Image (spheres, helix red, strand yellow):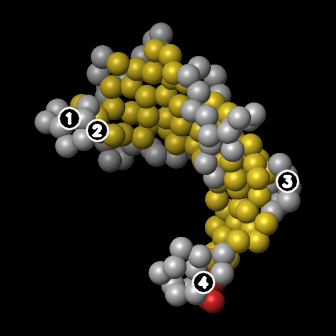
Amino acid sequence: MHGQRAVLHVKNLPLIDTFQFFGPNDTPGLVDFRVEWEATGPPVVRGQGAAVDPTDPAAFLGDIAPAVSNGSFSGEEIGFAFESNGAASSSPRGYAQIGRERTASSSEERLGGGRSGNAGDSVPRSEPRQGPLACRPEAPMRE
């Protein structure tokens, strides 16, 4: 797994900002984010597979490796926009993991990224994106 890499890139994902949970105001917005994980060491076998009840959190088999992750984030809604100040990174103070796993009840294998420890700084965007801010179901969610 050393050298394995995963990328999650989402562009123009429509969402509704309510400013507070279950709040009365709904404002359409868009977000972009890209997160990359790269293994930095050997994988460790995790999970117990079919040896435990299918509802047990350990009911999977996987190889999980330490990793470094980097991400960039931006978003906008009417009257407000933000973007990360460069790429946020899990290195040197945070952590990340990458691995392959499959559930005990499936032979399907998935490549998955882990979590990043540091979110990075956000700064206001100097120029908003061009085009209308509307939540469109047909808007592309992945590039």
Q: Residue at x 57, y 32 (%)?
A: 119
Please tell me which residue lies in front, 40 or 58: 58
Q: Amino acid at mark 2?
A: Ile
Question: SS class of the residue under badge 2?
Answer: strand
Mark 3 or mark 1, which is nearer the start of the sequence?
A: 1
Compute the Cα span from label 1 to label 3.
45 Å
Mark 1 or mark 4, which is nearer the start of the sequence?
A: 1
Please tell me which residue lies in front, 14 or 98: 98
Q: Amino acid at mark 4?
A: Ala
Asked if the residues shown at circle 1 and circle 2 are in contact, with their CB atoms under 8 angstroms apart, the answer is yes
**Residue 65 location, x and y as percent?**
77, 58
Q: Nearer the viewer, mark 1 or mark 3?
A: 3
Identify the residue at the far left of this view.
24
The residue beneath circle 2 is: 16
Label 4 packing within 10 angstroms: few (<14), some (14-19), many (20+): some
Q: Is residue 110 left or right of residue 81?
A: right
Mark 3 or mark 4, which is nearer the start of the sequence?
A: 3
Q: Residue at x 54, y 37 (%)?
A: 33
The residue beneath circle 1 is: 26
The residue beneath circle 4 is: 104
Compute the Cα span from label 4 to label 1.
41 Å
Q: Nearer the viewer, mark 4 or mark 1?
A: 4
**Residue 99 location, x and y as percent?**
71, 61
Q: Residue at x 29, y 21 (%)?
A: 78
The residue beneath circle 3 is: 41
